[in-house]
């Protein structure tokens, strides 16, 4: 159940943290813009745009609310658009910009797999469209902390859910670890199921996820179990899920970090071929529960073994592509140097210089669709 009524949150910021246009400003725009569009005299057009700008400036700007209940119309973007109308050289151009602005306020244009309103695409500057992500620092807000070694940054599931799901849809994370995906799914109003082999991790993550604000009243559930053996159909039945609309896979990067002693733990697999085979098996399972045409995301890095670069990422990518998925995009992302690693950074630099290799600073986000 989605709950984002404006009455409940009278003062809001849009999802990307920008100041939202107030209801009063929106009705002024809707009242005045049609008159501006029909004007043919550039001087009158410019003046009308300036008058409208002055009125908008007089309306109070909305105060921020800690919860992000939705993407409201950005005041900043509207002001920039009105300035564009006022600065136009010809009446045709000015009327065109005014018409475009009016349309963006009144006609939503969303795609098949997300809620991004393309009529207001300029407001989405928080959504990354480049394939190289350089991020510094972590989000430590609302439940996110560094208690789990091997977690990913919240920005990854957040960006993926914004691009590849609509509000109220279902996300599956079969390697949930500390529950980063589930925390972000609550913030964004997506339902999510998380699975992890380690029951203690699941218990702790469940507590943290449960304590995270849930403004859209979505469902987030975690299960302890082997993601290669767990009965997804039973979970789906229990939660009344037809299909998942997004799968996020963040498996161990083979044996780089050992997560437990369990023989089922993918981090205990020493042979790379066996590890890749397991990823293949899992992606076949995911194929069976993911809605056709929807997305599967895999976050993984490479490893060195006996002085040789093992391209784990590309091996897994290839395996998934052979299991009925199309590769749609590939992102290369830097990773945070953790406190522990920072102290040994100079040692690694020396080793790299003497051994002729490069210290890993990147990992991959592969984005596939189920065909
Ligand atoms: C890289 S971590 C995922 C971290 C997570 N994205 C987060 O932000 O906390 C990989 C997780 O996979 C889990 N794992 C390993 N083998 C598994 C298996 N066969 N089934 C389910 N979970 C497994 C580990 O316990 C670990 O929590």
Image: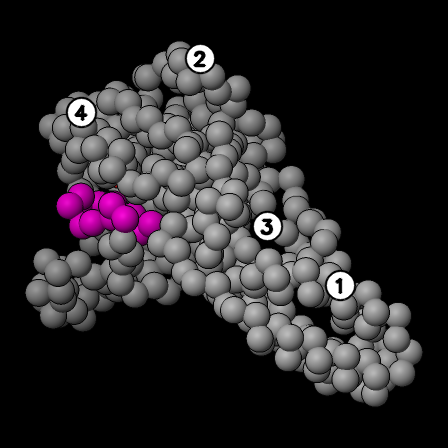
Residue at (57% x, 70% y) in the render: 59
In which quadrant of the rendered view does residue 31 lie? Answer: bottom right
Dot label at residue 288: none
Mark 3 sits on what residue? 116
Q: Residue at x 55, y 55 (%)?
A: 72
Q: Dot 1 surroundings within 10 Å: few (below 14), some, or many (20 or more)?
A: few
**Please, is residue 246 above or below residue 83 in the view?**
above
Label 3 neighbourhood size at 10 Å, few (<14), some (14-19), many (20+)? Answer: many
Of 293 and 52, nearer the camera is: 52
Q: Which mark is residue 31?
A: 1
| Residue extent of the magenta highlight | 142-155
- Residue 175: image x %, image y %? 30, 33
The residue singled out by tag 4 in the image is 199
The CA distance from mark 1 to mark 2 is: 49 Å
**Residue for badge 2:** 237
The Cα–Cα distance between marks 3 and 4, rounded to whole angstroms, is: 36 Å
Would the CB of label 1 be found within 8 Å of ligand 1? no
- Mark 2, Cα crowd under 10 Å, few <14 / some 14-19 / many 20+, is few
Label 4 within 8 A of ligand 1 by Cβ: no
Q: Earlier in the sequence, mark 1 or mark 2?
A: 1
Q: Is residue 302 magenta?
A: no
- Say which residue appears at 59% left-offset and 40% top-offset: 113
């Amino acid at each position: 159940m989605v709950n984002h009524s404006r009455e409940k949150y009278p003062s809001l910021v849009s999802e990307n943290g920008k100041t939202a246009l107030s209801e009063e400003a929106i009705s002024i725009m809707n009242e005045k813009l049609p008159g501006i569009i029909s004007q043919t005299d550039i001087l009158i057009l410019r003046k009308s745009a300036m008058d409208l700008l002055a009125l908008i400036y007089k309306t109070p700007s909305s105060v921020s609310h800690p919860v992000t209940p939705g993407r409201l119309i950005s005041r900043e973007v509207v002001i920039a658009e009105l300035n564009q109308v006022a600065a136009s050289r010809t009446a045709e151009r000015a009327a065109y910009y005014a018409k475009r602005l009016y349309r963006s306020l009144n006609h939503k244009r969303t795609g098949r797999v997300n809620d991004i309103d393309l009529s207001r695409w300029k407001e989405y500057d928080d959504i990354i469209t480049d394939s190289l992500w350089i991020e510094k620092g972590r989000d430590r807000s609302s439940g996110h902390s560094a208690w789990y070694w091997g977690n990913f940054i919240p920005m990854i599931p957040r960006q993926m859910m914004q691009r590849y799901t609509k509000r109220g849809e279902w996300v599956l994370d079969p390697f949930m670890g500390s529950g980063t995906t589930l925390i972000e799914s609550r913030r964004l109003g997506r339902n999510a199921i998380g699975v992890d082999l380690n029951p203690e991790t699941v218990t702790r993550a469940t507590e943290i996820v449960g304590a995270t604000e849930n403004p859209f009243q979505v469902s987030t559930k975690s299960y302890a179990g082997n993601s290669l053996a767990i009965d997804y159909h039973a979970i789906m039945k229990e939660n009344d899920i037809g299909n998942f609309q997004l799968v996020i896979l963040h498996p161990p990067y083979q044996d780089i970090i050992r997560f437990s002693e369990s023989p089922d733990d993918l981090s205990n697999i020493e042979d790379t071929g066996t590890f890749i085979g397991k990823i293949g098996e899992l992606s076949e399972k995911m194929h069976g529960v993911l809605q056709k045409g929807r997305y599967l995301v895999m976050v993984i890095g490479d490893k060195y073994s006996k002085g040789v670069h093992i391209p784990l990422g590309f091996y897994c990518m290839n395996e998934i592509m052979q299991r009925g998925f199309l590769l749609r995009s590939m992102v290369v992302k830097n990773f945070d140097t953790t406190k522990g690693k920072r102290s040994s950074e100079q040692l690694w630099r020396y080793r790299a210089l003497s051994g002729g290799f490069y210290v890993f600073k990147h990992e991959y986000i592969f984005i596939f669709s189920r065909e």
